[in-house]
């Protein structure tokens, strides 16, 4: 059985793209500033991208979530070239689109379970992929403690991803009733 989803308004679609672009731009800029030998500021902003895609996926389905990810990817990479070195922009773009598509697919497959399972599992697995791709391309072979930055960033991404369950739960409570209810036999 195929699930149907409502069509977003142009404003809702634009808001989703703008949110994705803002998260990626902020993260690409902030990753250049280490806090210490195991963490950069970018780890705190990036997991918000999973919240954005999970909310869009929940409300409008995986098709629109993928469109927002691809459009957000294109705009963010182009703009990131002005804020970050080309290697960081390219690494970010590849890591972003791979992890977003994984997150969207996993979330959709798990959406019928308890409210927290889909965003938690999708975010954790996608964050691991994102970290491997981003850090492996952006900083491998460069000076600096990039491996410890990668591990520190992943730890913070996972912690922030778990924290994002709170705003996810609060925001899904604001969705129209027909799309907020879990299928029969599952927890809301």
Image: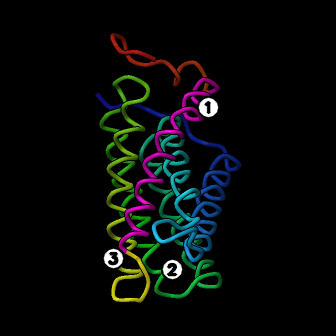
**Lower position in the chain sequence, tag 2 or tag 3:** 2
Residue 95 sits in which quadrant? bottom left
| Crowd tier of the residue under label 1, counting other residues whose Cα lies within 10 Å: few below 14, some 14–19, many 20 or above | few
Q: Position of residue 96 (x, y in %)?
A: 44, 65
User: What sort of colour scheme is used for the picture?
Assistant: rainbow
The span picked out in magenta is: 147-174
| Magenta stretch prevailing secondary structure | helix
Considering every residue shown, the one lying at the far right of the view is 11
Specify whether residue 112 is painted magenta: no
Judging by the rendered image, the residue that carries numbered circle 2 is 89
Element type where label 2 sits in the image: helix
Residue 45, numbered circle: none
Q: Position of residue 158 (x, y in %)?
A: 42, 48
Q: Is residue 94 above or below residue 151?
A: below
Is residue 11 rendered to the left or right of residue 95? right
Residue 134 sits in which quadrant? bottom left
Judging by the rendered image, the residue that carries numbered circle 1 is 171
**Lower position in the chain sequence, tag 2 or tag 1:** 2
Question: Looking at the image, which residue is at 35% across and 26% down?
Answer: 112
Q: How far apart are labels 2 and 3 at the CA level? A: 13 Å
Task: For the N terminus, give its image quadrant.
Answer: top left
| Crowd tier of the residue under label 3, counting other residues whose Cα lies within 10 Å: few below 14, some 14–19, many 20 or above | some
Residue 136, numbered circle: 3
Question: Looking at the image, which residue is at 34% across and 83% down?
Answer: 140
Element type where label 1 sits in the image: helix
Q: Nearer the viewer, residue 52 or 129?
A: 129
Question: Looking at the image, which residue is at 57% across and 77% down?
Answer: 32
**Lower position in the chain sequence, tag 1 or tag 3:** 3
Specify whether residue 162 is painted magenta: yes
Q: Position of residue 24 (x, y in %)?
A: 57, 65
């Amino acid at each position: 059985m195929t699930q149907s989803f409502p069509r977003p308004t142009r404003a809702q679609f634009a808001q989703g793209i703008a949110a994705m672009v803002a998260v990626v731009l902020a993260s690409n800029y902030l990753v250049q500033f280490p806090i210490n030998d195991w963490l950069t500021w970018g780890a705190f902003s990036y997991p918000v991208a999973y919240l954005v895609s999970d909310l869009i996926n929940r409300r409008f389905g995986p098709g629109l979530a993928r469109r927002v990810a691809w459009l957000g990817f294109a705009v963010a990479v182009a703009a990131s070239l002005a804020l970050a070195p080309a290697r960081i922009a390219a690494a970010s773009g590849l890591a972003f689109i791979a992890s977003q598509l994984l997150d969207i697919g996993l979330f959709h497959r798990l959406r019928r379970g308890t409210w927290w399972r889909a965003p938690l599992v999708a975010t954790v697995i996608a964050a691991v992929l994102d970290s491997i791709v981003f850090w492996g391309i952006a900083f491998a072979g460069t000076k600096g403690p990039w491996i410890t930055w990668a591990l520190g960033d992943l730890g913070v991404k996972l912690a922030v991803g778990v924290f994002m369950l709170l705003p996810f739960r609060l925001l899904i409570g604001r969705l129209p009733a027909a799309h907020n209810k879990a299928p029969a036999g599952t927890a809301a």
